[in-house]
Image (cartoon, rainbow, N blue to C red):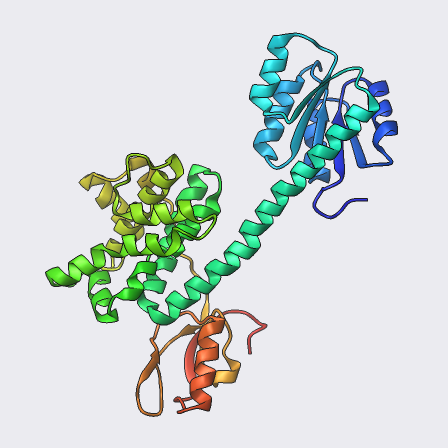
Amino acid sequence: MSDGNGGRRVLCVDDEANVLAGLERTLFEHFEVFTAGGGAAGLEVLESDGPFAVVVSDMRMPEMDGAAFLSRVRHDYPHTVRILLTGQTELDSAIAAVNEGNIFRFLCKPCPQETLLHSLETAAEQYRLITAERDLLENTLKGSIKVLTEILSLTSPIAFSRAGQIKAYVAHMAQRLGVEDQWQYEMAAMLSQLGCITMPSETLGKVYTGQAISDDERQMFDEHPEIGHKLLAHIPRLEAVAAMIRNQRGTADADAAPDERLGGQMLHVALAVDRLVATGTKVGIAVAQLKEKGGLEPALLNALTDFKAHEQTQTIKALPVEQLRAGMVLDEDVRTKKDTVVINKGEELHAAHIARLANFARGIGINEPIRVSVPANPQIH
């Protein structure tokens, strides 16, 4: 009866076996029912047999009462909808359950079968809506972002390359801090340099390597976070990401939400570290220097103290265009027969790059084979 994502699965938790048996008889024709004889047992079932659309819990149970149990469920399984079914009438207990477990329904024993079934159907629909929203974010939205990042990689390879490193720093900070909705922070990092598509690559190269630039070039670069914000601000579900990108200079609007402020600070710290790393400084040394200098959020710098650059065994190969694969990194500039650079050395290839190279190869021609760095992988020949 399971739909693969827990949409009709219900876990009933109660320390009285006869109550669990009655719930199972009432619900088995409508839901896939699991039972547990207490809060600790319920957590074990959630871990071993989840996901579940709905958890129905009694309030008065030994060792772990319903409020404490549902609070754990809320923390560990935030998408599961929570219902409290109890014979208790004490107002304080009910308030504790609502506040700590953020329950969806509060039902009193004895609960009429029709009321119980209606509540569970409503809860299952709520779960369906929650998971549909999550699927939208993880699939449709991320697919759109993939298109944007590939456009960035084609129009400004140097900005795309830097954004990839910024994402690595931000993902590490987010994981160490245990932030919710980590995808938002990683997405903001990956799109943090989107506004740079308006800038000449020569100017970006000078900025990223710490070379002197003119006042006009500095103004152009300083405006890129606002440009990135404007490009993203009207895309549904990306409002917070856009605000993080605007805040990457280390300042935030007074009315910025906590996640928007934190995301901007993460980007600001990651960019500061990356500027030093680009000059040849090791990450650990860069973090120590920035701590000593002051002005950046100490907790975020501390989160980077154990950052390790990704190391992977690479093999250099010279391949024709038709054998190029996503994930390979160019070990030389790709040039046309007329000696025009198509893609710069150091760029990681994506599907859009390979399609572009194939078009050039069929048209004016490119110099082949192309030297690439290939991750050690027996599937790549």
Q: Does residue 197 show up?
A: yes
Foreground of the two, 349 or 10: 10
Quarter of the image for residue 220 reads bottom left
Residue 152 x, y percent position in the rendering: 38, 65
User: In the displayed structure, would residue 35 be above or below residue 239?
Assistant: above
Image position of 111 (left or right of 52): right
Question: Residue at position x 28%, y 39% from top?
Answer: 253
Residue 124 x, y percent position in the rendering: 71, 37
Question: Residue at position x 68%, y 30% from top?
Answer: 43
User: In the displayed structure, would residue 230 be above or below residue 37?
Assistant: below
Question: Residue at position x 54%, y 50% from top?
Answer: 137
User: In the displayed structure, would residue 354 be above or below residue 193?
Assistant: below
Q: Quadrant of the N terminus?
A: top right
Residue 111 x, y percent position in the rendering: 79, 19
Q: Quadrant of the C terminus?
A: bottom right
Q: Does residue 319 show up?
A: no
Foreground of the two, 143 or 324: 143
* Marker count (numbered): 0
Question: Residue at position x 33%, y 68% from top?
Answer: 156
